[in-house]
Amino acid sequence: MVVTSFTLTCLSSCNQISSSLHVFRPIHSNPKSNKVANFYSSSGVFSVKAYYENQNSISGFANKVIGSLPVIGLLARILSDEGGVGSDTVDFAEFRRRVGNNCGINDSKAFYDFQERRGRAGDPLYVLMCCWVAAVGAGLLKSEEILEGATRLRISNDLEFEEQNFIALMNEAKERRSKFNVAIPSIAMEVRAEKALEAVYVCCFRREAIEEEDKRLLITMLSAVFPSVKPAEIERIVKDRARKVAEGSDENGFPEPKPLPEEAVKLQMKDLQFLQQNRDT
């Protein structure tokens, strides 16, 4: 009886967490849309991949061509639950949905348990934000820009603002590269996973040690977010980070957030004014 009660409580807590994360697969789906999407994918007309798509691969090239075609590109965007068609940037909501399609109960429980250990700083959305910016922004953003955003997130608790700021930085980087006809470098998923861990540590741990239970949870969460990276490599990345922290040889440090661009400050002020107006009415 005690075991049954504990199991039900655990599953209930995991479901609450995963509903906000989109960790579990959507309960309601459109069978017709799924059938059409599966048909197109299996017939080779087009195949929409997610954030871990290798843009230099044949399928990545096909994805870019599809996104540039007016009618087919529109259809692909409608049928794709994951986003990232053509050169579109996968936003945070789309990223969470994509991660959710790869997650099971144990993965969801790892996010829940991590939050229990780390408190507000270990919020699953914080973890996923750090993973998102590393997954889609590596090659466009500098490491310090990612870590500065992770530091700000820990302090401000403003997910929406950080997402918009990261997207603005990525768009600016794309424009600069397009202007000078410079290709976006191809960054291995192993490197993206390592950058994600760096951001998670800055956001969720500050300067505290990574304990054994933290290692286990980090390995589970990163494996869920980066399924194409071998589990042994994820484990190596996490243990290496924990060792460096224990030895005090973490070269990244904890960057202080730099002053935001003028446009970002204006956006934040508009949000504050909007909240004030709603509070007054």
Image: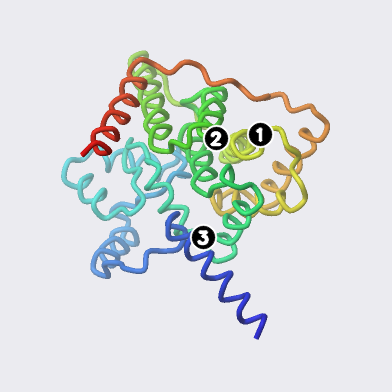
The span from disc 1 to disc 3 (Cα, nearest Å) is: 27 Å
For the point 45% across and 40% down, the residue is: 57
- Which is nearer the N-term, disc 2 or disc 1? 2
Disc 2 marks which residue?
A: 154
Of 191 and 125, nearer the camera is: 125
SS label for mark 2? helix
Q: What amino acid does circle 1 point to?
A: Arg
Quadrant where the image shows the N terminus: bottom right
Quadrant where the image shows the C terminus: top left
Q: Is residue 122 left or right of residue 239?
A: left
Disc 3 marks which residue?
A: 103
Q: Is residue 276 left or right of residue 215?
A: left
Of all residues shown, which one is farthest toward the bottom? 1
The span from disc 2 to disc 3 (Cα, nearest Å) is: 25 Å
Q: Are marks 2 and 1 in contact (CB under 8 Å)?
A: yes
**Mark 1 residue crowding within 10 angstroms, few (<14) / some (14–19) / many (20+):** some
- Which is nearer the N-term, disc 1 or disc 3? 3
Q: Are marks 1 and 3 in contact (CB under 8 Å)?
A: no
The span from disc 2 to disc 1 (Cα, nearest Å) is: 9 Å
Disc 1 marks which residue?
A: 206
